[in-house]
């Protein structure tokens, strides 16, 4: 029974990690698309905002409940 719980915990952890990576991928895709459209100033501002969001997200994940 202990091994089953370990396997389930790993599967849940991998699913959560995959979800977080997918959200990061979606966030980083927005400034790249804006840059390719020629909106360089807008892309830079969006890129800075995305990086700040990711830093706050990382900081929030380090806070112990």
Image (cartoon, rainbow, N blue to C red):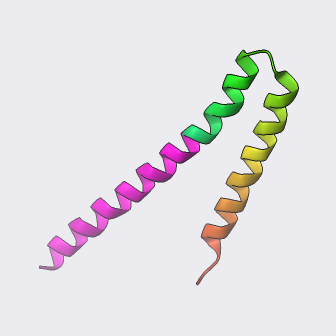
- Quadrant (top left, top right, bottom left, bottom right) of the N terminus: bottom left
Q: Residue at x 22, y 66 (%)?
A: 7
The span shown in magenta is 1-25
1 w.r.t. 19: above or below: below
How many circles with numbers are drawn on the protein? 0
Q: Is residue 39 magenta?
A: no
Per the image, is 15 magenta?
yes
At 73% from the left and 24% from the top, the residue drawn is: 34
Question: Residue 32: where, in percent of width, then height?
Answer: 68, 26
Q: Residue at x 74, y 46 (%)?
A: 51
Q: Is residue 37 left or right of residue 14?
A: right
Residue drawn at (84%, 37%) of the image:
45
Q: Nearer the viewer, residue 48 or 6?
A: 48
Give the vertical position of 39 relative to 16 (above or below): above
- Chief secondary structure of the magenta span? helix
Q: Residue 26: image x %, image y %?
A: 56, 39
Q: Quadrant of the C terminus?
A: bottom right
The image quarter in which residue 4 lies: bottom left
């Amino acid at each position: 029974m202990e091994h089953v719980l370990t396997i389930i915990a790993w599967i849940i952890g991998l699913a959560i990690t995959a979800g977080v990576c997918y959200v990061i991928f979606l966030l980083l895709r927005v400034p790249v698309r804006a840059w390719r459209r020629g909106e360089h100033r807008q892309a830079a501002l969006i890129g800075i905002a995305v990086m700040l969001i990711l830093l706050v997200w990382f900081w929030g994940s380090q806070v112990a409940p």
